[in-house]
Amino acid sequence: MFRPNFSYTDSMVNNLLEIHSIKDFIVNEPLVVEMEISLKRDALLKSVHHSTAIEGNPLTLNQIDKLTKGIEINAQKKAKQEVLNYIKVLENLDKYSENGKITEKTILQLHEDITHYTLEYTYLEGQYRTIPVHVVNNKGEIVFTPPHVNLIHKEMLNFVEWINHNVKLNPVIAAGIIHYEFMRIHPFVDGNGRTGRALAALFLYLKKFDVDRFFTLDEYYDNDRQSYYDALNSVDSETQEFTKWLDYFLKGFKISITEIKDQILLFSPENFGKQKVKVSNKYRKILEHIHLNGSITNSEVQKLLNISRQGAYKDLRYLMDSDIVDKKGGSRSTYYVLKNTYEENSNKK
């Protein structure tokens, strides 16, 4: 049975207190709607860039930004596919659970979608490895050897059971343990890093601790990969002692969430003479689509929300009347973009 051990150090306790305090601030702080959508998009792009970069993907943040907008970039097909897969998974995290629980099926589906058309053989998508693998650093040196293939299924079952039965554990601590244990088992032939980090993000989402998907830990890992590997290797597989790894994890969590707090303070509504506009989930989906793709059409809104043409126009009309989006183009080529008020005010600062 999987039973992780750890002790609360002074730094862990202090970081946890600050993390919870900052989380409460982010949740309750009024925010210009354009900024809210912008923070989410930036977090998505950074998460995709840094998580795939750790595993060797060469695409820059700027290239990924262009790729999401449908702009052609000069890159290998596999590199582009890895990025597009990861974006789709992170955008649809809410669909990866069964009645609010993470199951073995959940994890297999995550891996299948993350590695779709990127592995040497498609039958390896969403399937546990049947060969031994080694984790290597950027110098090609072996830094970790995962469990034997015969142990994978049993260890994954124990792992999933632990995830769903430790409801009293602090969600940030639990997410750190989930991240490590998945990486230790390394159940797949490739794509374990992306799947493990997405799994931790899914867990935080289900525990309502993803603070509206504003921040990402992947940049923290990518900025110093050796420290990331060293922290993972600090866990004693025999005693399952997690203290050093969790100390590292919580430090990164605090750094990442603090950056979001600083951005929110800088771009608060008072600084731009605007009020926060409350929008429902359907309007938020429209705005997130615009921010990710640059614009949206009536037909795209119909498809996105599964509504009629008239219903789509009504929703777009509301966003125009709320001074959030602008209508562009002619009668047969009409499209909608975010209103540039926020950008203009930013340039005046």
Image (spheres, rainbow, N blue to C red):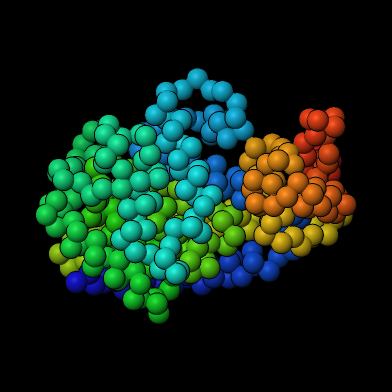
Q: Nearer the viewer, residue 245 or 38?
A: 38
Q: How many marks?
A: 0
Q: Residue at x 57, y 62 (%)?
A: 211
- Counting from the top left corner in percent of width and height, residue 179 is at 35, 57
- Quadrant of the snapshot with the N terminus: bottom left
Q: In this rendering, is residue 178 above or below 110?
A: below
Q: In terms of depth relative to the viewer, which is nearer, 242 or 105?
A: 105
Is residue 337 at all visible to an observer of this figure?
no
Work out whether 268 lies above or below 118. Answer: below
Q: Is residue 97 left or right of residue 290?
A: left
Residue 182 x %, y %: 29, 56
Left or right: where does residue 204 sit relative to residue 236?
Answer: right
Q: Residue at x 24, y 65 (%)?
A: 157
229 above or below 22? above
Quadrant of the rendered image containing residue 332? top right
Locate the C terminus and report the quarter of the image it occupies: top right
Camera-nearest residue between 175 and 150: 150
Which corner quadrant of the image does residue 300 belong to?
top right
In the visual, does 156 lie left or right of 297? left
Identify whether 226 is placed above or below 138: below
Residue 328, image x and y in percent?
A: 83, 34
- What residue appears at the point 44 percent right and 33 percent down from the top-left corner? 81
The residue depicted at 77 percent of the width and 36 percent of the height is 335
Instruction: Give how far across and how far down residue 348 sits, in percent.
Output: 84, 41
